[in-house]
Amino acid sequence: MPRELILKGRLWILMENENLFSDIDTDMIYHNAHLAVTEIDEMGQYAFGNLEGYKDFADKAQPSDIILAGDNFGSGSSRQHAVDCFKALGVQAVIARSFGAIYKRNAINSGFPIIELPGLPDNLFNQHDQAELNLESGTLSAGDNRYQGNLMSEVARDIYLAGGLFQYAERM
């Protein structure tokens, strides 16, 4: 199935005290109590199950949603479930000011798009805005608001387009 470089979907903006929620670690994204779940399709129900204010995310998320967060998203342990739970729900991408290094590598290897928007103001976009994320340019747009983030690296883009690291390697 061909993958798009321009994603359109509803924004899920993660906020804490009127600021973009920062330092969301992998245990908040996917609690370690559910690590025995090995089927990706079953992981979605546990997404953000340990994140105050968003424990009902899995029930409310819709395919094509795009998550927006603050700094250091996915910090903590190497937990592939923290990427796969979003894929199970049909979430298209995660956008944040920055990502934990291991989470970033896991997402790229899985062909799950992430975009960094350093310096993004807290209230530029509105909850559930219909947004457009251009993976090639790193631009997020919704309504009259637009923000330029970092570009995906060429190899991250190629891995995403291939469907993941293993599929990318098979093509090499």
Image (cartoon, rainbow, N blue to C red):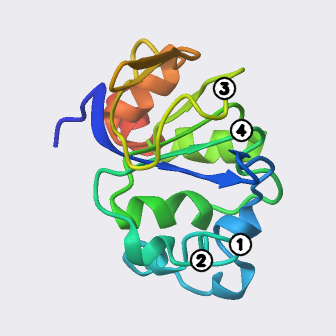
The residue beneath circle 1 is 52
- Dot 1 and dot 2 residues touching (CB under 8 Å): yes
The alpha-carbon separation of the residues under discs 3 and 4 comes to: 16 Å
Image check: 171 left or right of 32?
left
At x 69% / y 21%, what residue is drawn? Answer: 118
> In the rendered image, which residue does mark 4 sit on?
99
Helix or strand or loop: what does disc 1 sit on? loop
**Observer-nearest of 128 and 115:** 128
Mark 3 vs mark 2, CA separation in Å: 25 Å
Give how far apart the Cα atoms at labels 1 and 3 are: 22 Å
Label 2: state its secondary structure.
Answer: loop
Q: Residue at x 65, y 81 (%)?
A: 35
> Which sits earlier in the primary sequence, circle 1 or circle 3?
1
Image quadrant containing the N terminus: top left
**Label of residue 55 in the image:** 2
Residue type pointed to by label 3: Pro
Q: Are marks 3 and 2 in contact (CB under 8 Å)?
A: no
